[in-house]
Image (cartoon, helix red, strand yellow):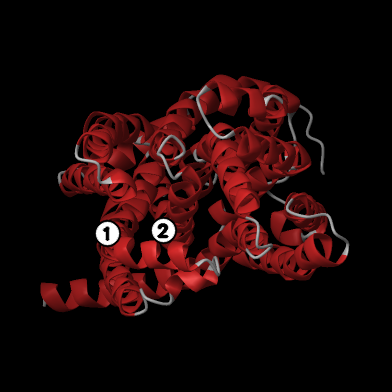
Amino acid sequence: METEVNKACGIQELKKVSLMAAPMVVVSVSQYLLPAVSLMMAGHLGNLPALSGVSIATCFTNATGFDVLLGLSGALETLCGQAYGAGQYKKFGSYIYCAIILLILICFPVSILWIFMDKILISIGLNPEISKVACKYSIVLIPALFAYAILQSLIRYFQSQCLLLPILIGSLAALSVHIPLCWALIYRWKFGEIGGAVSIGACHWLNVMFLAAYMRYSSSCEKTRTLSWKCVFSSISELWRFALPSAVMVCLEWWTFEIITLLAGRLPDSKLETSVLSICITTTSLHYFVQYGLGAAASTRVSNELGSGNPQAARSVVRVVLAVSITEAVTVSTVLLGCRRIFGYAFSNDKEVVSYVTKIAPLLCLSIIMDSLQAVLSGIARGCGWQKIGAIVNLGSYYIVGLTISVVLCFVFHLKGKGLWAGVLTGSIVQVVLLAAITASTNWQKQAHMAKERIFKGPSQQIVDSEIEL
């Protein structure tokens, strides 16, 4: 009887997760496709420095800007998800507005860094021609950075309430505009590779304006859009306590890929090595965001259930999302392995590039499986508020293990790009094993108790302030 009940609960949870995961997958992939489309179109200009420059710029801007904002906004998955599950709507809104202010402020020093990117890249030994292209592309991308700061906060706002239709429509609309606009700017209006950056910025702002308007005028947002400035300012320390380790957790992982791209730029045939590695990173990242959508659904479901005091439901979510993740990852890896000889043509017409991609494809397929599992396990960690633990795990996995092996295989055993990627794959395996062990040994009853304590304590709970209906 107990087995049948557990099976029924699992099926019910699968339906809930699927209804959340499907739109979140589309949202995540649609957002990632904006820079990916720009990279592909730059690659078909027939100019290898343009492809390499955009690849380096994409890596650098992700490492120093977009990944940082994405990581910081991960704190909202813990705080807003649990606050909404506990019915604390005033606190929920305060976290959102506080995050928007915090993320916008961070954009200013990041923008200054991007302006001087060429000098930084040249100083660490990269090709001057590639560095100048990368710097020009990054400067044009600065408006997109500010839009992204607001966008990530708004996405967490809707995601934590399971209001997925607005972010689904906004993301698809932005992508639908980006593809023809990017093509027109690059090829028709002769902007060259920087046309992709112009288009990304325009589409991010389009998405922000749509979501902000929906938040302002939709009755479904009435309870959570109220603004209390005292609550906002009193939430800064609590938000930052989760945001900082959340950013470290994300950045330590993604910086690994940027570092190996920079290391590839120091190899003798740097243009070929960086181009191929950028294709591998773009591919794994694209698939990663499919699984990131599933992880976001898991994060929301786990945080909502813990906030509501339902630990058994949270445990059921974990089992279901891991089963779905493994099934999807194995399927995609098998298909990619079968298409490895023609896959490279999606990014470049250069036969040398395509041939290199074919050789590295088996490692790429294994990376897809590992990245899928860690994307979901990281989502579970964000839902529970384990950002500090995740940061420690990522530090050990990628920097003590992964990068060490990458450097040895690449520069000591002269495996070049293959060695760099094999080291990162090893780090991913270690990361998945550690996160899986932590998740398997979790006391979910204790996690639910901790969530209740977190949401129902703090100065913002006692503040009585005039509220502004936005």
Mark 2, other Cα within 10 Å: few <14 / some 14–19 / many ≥20: some
Q: Residue 369: x, y in percent?
A: 28, 62
- Identify residue for label 2: 284
Distance between mark 1 and mark 2 Cα atoms: 11 Å
Residue type indicated by callout 2? Thr
Q: Is residue 391 left or right of residue 151?
A: left
- Identify residue for label 1: 363
Farthest front residue? 268
Farthest right residue? 189
Q: Residue 287: x, y in percent?
A: 43, 63
Which residue is at a point 49% across and 57% down the rendered structure image?
282
Q: Residue 307: x, y in percent?
A: 42, 45
The secondary element bearing badge 1 is classed as helix
Q: Is residue 462 visible?
A: no
Q: Is residue 113 left or right of residue 309?
A: right
Image quarter for residue 450? top left
Q: Residue 138: x, y in percent?
A: 70, 39
Placement of 430 over or under 321, stated as above or below: above
Q: Is residue 156 visible?
A: yes
